[in-house]
Amino acid sequence: MTTPLSNGRQADTERHRRRGLEAIAAAVDHGSPLTASAIARAASVDRTFLYRHRDLLETLHTAASRPATAPGAGPAVTNTSLQADLANARAARLAARVQQLEKHLSQHLGNQAWRESGLGSPAGIEELQRTITQLEQRAVDLTAALEERGAELEAAREANRQLTRALNQRK
């Protein structure tokens, strides 16, 4: 059973489909972009309308994959050729990046091998020597302080012994 509401929706869908097909045909004739967004805009429908109607989307993709038929326009540009150009550009960019990373890795490994071989001086040798000198001086100072404390302790023990003897002799 069909109702006036469902008949109206069906008629509205048919109008949208017809406008979509006309927009695809016009884009092919004028050499306009054949994308879902462009066709939806030209047909005054939502992009999701095209995705819900797979036959319209297939018509769009078929039209986009055909070469442009402009007279004297030179080589045909299709969606496939544009995708191939994009893939080639990405491959070239990735190849350049790989070369850059290989060069960086080579330099890093070379520097590491140079340091590990002992042929080159370490990068902050002066800083390390300065630190060693400071630590040696600190060790000498601490040793002197320890000897002084040891002497004071020995003097305190001796004084304690003498006081203990003096107390023991009084008794």
Image: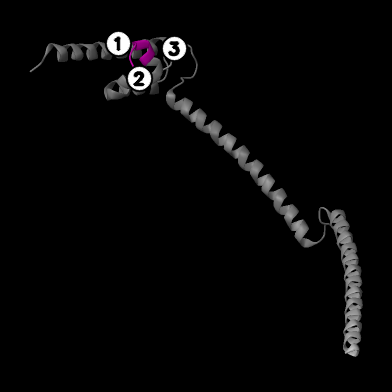
Disc 1 is placed on an element classified as helix
The kind of residue tagged 1 is Arg
Q: Which span is picked out in magenta?
A: 40-46
The verdict on residue 155 being magenta is no
Residues at circles 3 and 2 in contact by the CB criterion of under 8 Å: no
Disc 2 is placed on an element classified as helix
> In the rendered image, which residue does mark 2 sit on?
47
Disc on the earlier residue, 1 or 2: 1
**Residue depicted at x 34% and y 17%:** 46
The residue nearer to you, when weighing 8 against 98, is 8
Is 49 placed left or right of 159 in the picture?
Answer: left
Residue lying farthest left? 1
> In the rendered image, which residue does mark 1 sit on?
19
User: Which label belongs to residue 70?
Assistant: 3
Residue lying farthest front? 171
> Does residue 125 lie above or below 62 as drawn?
below
Residue 6 point in image, percent of width and height: 16, 15
